[in-house]
């Protein structure tokens, strides 16, 4: 699976999407006083202008404050980024014929509980990846249970209805299999290692949506669960955004 040329192409698309995140941060568009829709619009302009992105396989998602509790399928009201806040961004740009799907969370200000959750996201992603590698015949439902258990053991709630999904040539949503078989979720009893209808390995995005135990805020992290072994890009902590400026720094 890790030597599949399709996976290498997906990893290259993901690298470009992560470079898009770098450009978003350097542009300073995520900051207090801006609305989610303003940030989302600017992301679309950066993606098109600097990376030539013409298609997104899912809507661009920017969530702040209480909206970080909402799932991707929800459409909560537009919020303004606060001085002490968490913002997460979920992007699905298409590069050539290949889909990318990446999500990152950013702390605005210095609230220690916000920093703790954002720091936990890549750790939970790494734990999910390790569990998949240790149990190569695991089903989507079983890996979802592991994601929930990992979050609970670390002192968080798992907020996602799924813990990931397949990614492929655009558009993967038209693949002729039941939709539940596309997800790392409670309704998918199939092994993730099962081949697709054309006899090819399937490749999976991992999603970590953590929520604070008091239900006041959440955070999101997403990327390919497995990459070519020579190309694996380790999960890292997200950036901090100062509440009184656009300056960036690692927490």
Image: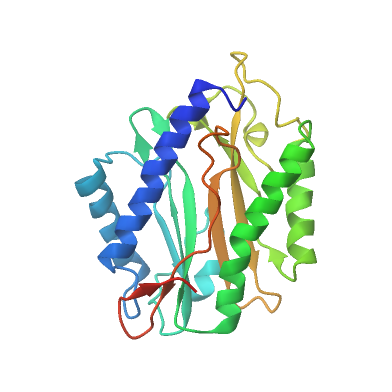
Locate residue 170, reporting x and y percent: 42, 29
Q: Residue reaching furthest front?
A: 230
Tell whether 191 sits left or right of 61. Answer: right
Tell whether 104 sits left or right of 202. Answer: left
| Residue 79, placed above or below residue 210 | below
Q: Residue reaching furthest left?
A: 49
Observer able to see residue 210: yes
The chosen color scheme is rainbow
| Residue 220, placed above or below residue 64 | above
| Residue 9, placed above or below residue 31 | above
Q: Nearer the viewer, residue 36 or 29?
A: 29
Residue in view at x 75 percent, y 71 percent: 155
Q: Nearer the viewer, residue 236 or 56?
A: 236
Residue in view at x 41 percent, y 74 percent: 79
Name the image quarter holding residue 220.
bottom right
Tell whether 150 sits left or right of 251. Answer: right
Tally of numbered tags: 0
Locate residue 128, reporting x and y percent: 70, 49
Quadrant of the image for the N terminus? top right
Q: Nearer the viewer, residue 173 or 91?
A: 91
Observer able to see residue 187: no
Name the image quarter holding residue 70.
bottom right
Locate residue 104, reporting x and y percent: 48, 59
| Residue 96, placed above or below residue 47 | above
Residue in view at x 53 percent, y 84 percent: 111
Locate residue 177, reporting x and y percent: 62, 24
Residue in view at x 26 percent, y 44 percent: 51
Q: Residue reaching furthest top?
A: 198
């Amino acid at each position: 699976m890790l030597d599949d040329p399709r996976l290498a192409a997906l990893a290259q698309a993901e690298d470009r999407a992560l470079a898009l995140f770098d450009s978003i941060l350097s542009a300073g568009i995520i900051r207090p006083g801006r609305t989610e829709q303003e940030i989302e619009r600017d992301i679309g302009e950066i993606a098109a202008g600097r990376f030539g992105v013409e298609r997104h396989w899912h809507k661009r998602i920017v969530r702040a404050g209480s909206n970080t509790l909402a799932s991707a399928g929800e459409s909560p009201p537009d919020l303004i980024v606060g001085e002490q806040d968490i913002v997460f961004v979920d992007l699905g740009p298409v590069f050539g014929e290949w889909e990318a799907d990446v999500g990152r969370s950013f702390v605005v200000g210095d609230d220690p509980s916000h920093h703790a959750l954002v720091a936990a996201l890549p750790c939970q992603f790494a734990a999910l990846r390790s569990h998949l590698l240790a149990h190569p015949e695991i089903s989507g439902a079983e890996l979802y249970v592991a994601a929930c258990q990992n979050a609970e053991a670390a002192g968080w709630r798992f907020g996602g209805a799924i813990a990931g999904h397949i990614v492929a040539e655009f558009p993967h949503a038209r693949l002729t299999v039941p939709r539940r078989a596309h997800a790392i979720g409670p309704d998918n009893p199939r092994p993730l290692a099962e081949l697709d209808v054309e006899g090819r390995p399937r490749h999976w995005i991992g999603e970590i949506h953590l929520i604070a135990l008091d239900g006041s805020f959440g955070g999101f992290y997403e990327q390919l669960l497995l990459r070519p072994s020579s190309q694996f890009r380790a999960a890292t902590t997200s950036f901090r955004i100062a509440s009184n400026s656009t300056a960036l720094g690692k927490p």
